[in-house]
Image (cartoon, helix red, strand yellow):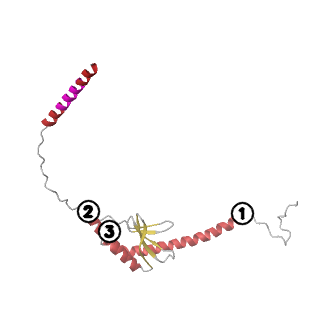
Amino acid sequence: MSEPETSGTHPSQPRPVRLRDALLRARIEAADRTGVVVDLRDAEVARLEILNDALDPLFAQVPEQIDLFDRGISQGDTPRLWIDVVAHIMMGRDKRMYRFVQDTRFGRIVLAESHDTAVIVEAVTDYVARRMIEREHAMVVPPEPQAPAAEQPARSRVWPFIFGFVLGAAALFGLAALAVLRSW
């Protein structure tokens, strides 16, 4: 067998592909794809920031003593605008649609979905109002109706003692009688 020539002296033969060149091309392609993904993620974050700014007047009306809501944008593979611990807004598949969801024991529930910021602001306003009412109901504990306690008659502790004494004496008498009968 003859070794293939690597000098490239024959114009009819293609130049052999070097691993270093292939790795360089793969890195460039990955950087291009990553750049597109980063641009999409930045666009999602920008849209969520616009919605966050639109929600400022709503959260300015929430009393400070109510600490149910912890609003903020989380960066990650899927950027999200968190309303509270269980509800957040994320972008839909087309990256232009807002999706307001709530996590429950039974899975995720879509509360609202729209391209329009005003629709999502209205849905968040309704959600915040419902959560504040739930908090009020949880904080107010109605007093349980108390029935007047009926006094139990005082029991004498003498009768159980007498009953135990008689029962013990009968048991001893029975054992004594059994021992006498056996010895016969």
Residue 53's place in the image compared with 142, above or below, is below
State yes or no: discs 2 and 3 in contact (Cβ < 8 Å): no
State the residue at coordinates (69%, 64%): 23
Asked whether 175 falls inside the magenta stretch, the response is yes
User: Could you tell which of marks 1 and 2 lies nearer the N-terminus?
Assistant: 1
Three-letter code for the amino acid on which mark 1 is drawn: Arg
Under circle 2, the secondary element is: helix
**Disc 2 packing (10 Å; few <14; some 14–19; many ≥20):** few
Res 16 quadrant in image: bottom right
Identify the residue under disc 2.
Answer: 139
Asked whether 36 or 169 is in front, the reply is: 169
**Disc 1 packing (10 Å; few <14; some 14–19; many ≥20):** few
Identify the residue under disc 3.
Answer: 131
Range covered by the magenta-colored residues? 166-176
Under circle 1, the secondary element is: helix
x then y, percent, for residue 184: 27, 19
x then y, percent, for residue 11: 84, 72
Residue 151's place in the image compared with 170, above or below, is below
Three-letter code for the amino acid on which mark 3 is drawn: Arg
Asked whether 1 falls inside the magenta stretch, the response is no
Identify the residue under disc 1.
Answer: 20
Query: Which numbered mark, 3 or 1, is in the foreground of this view?
Result: 3
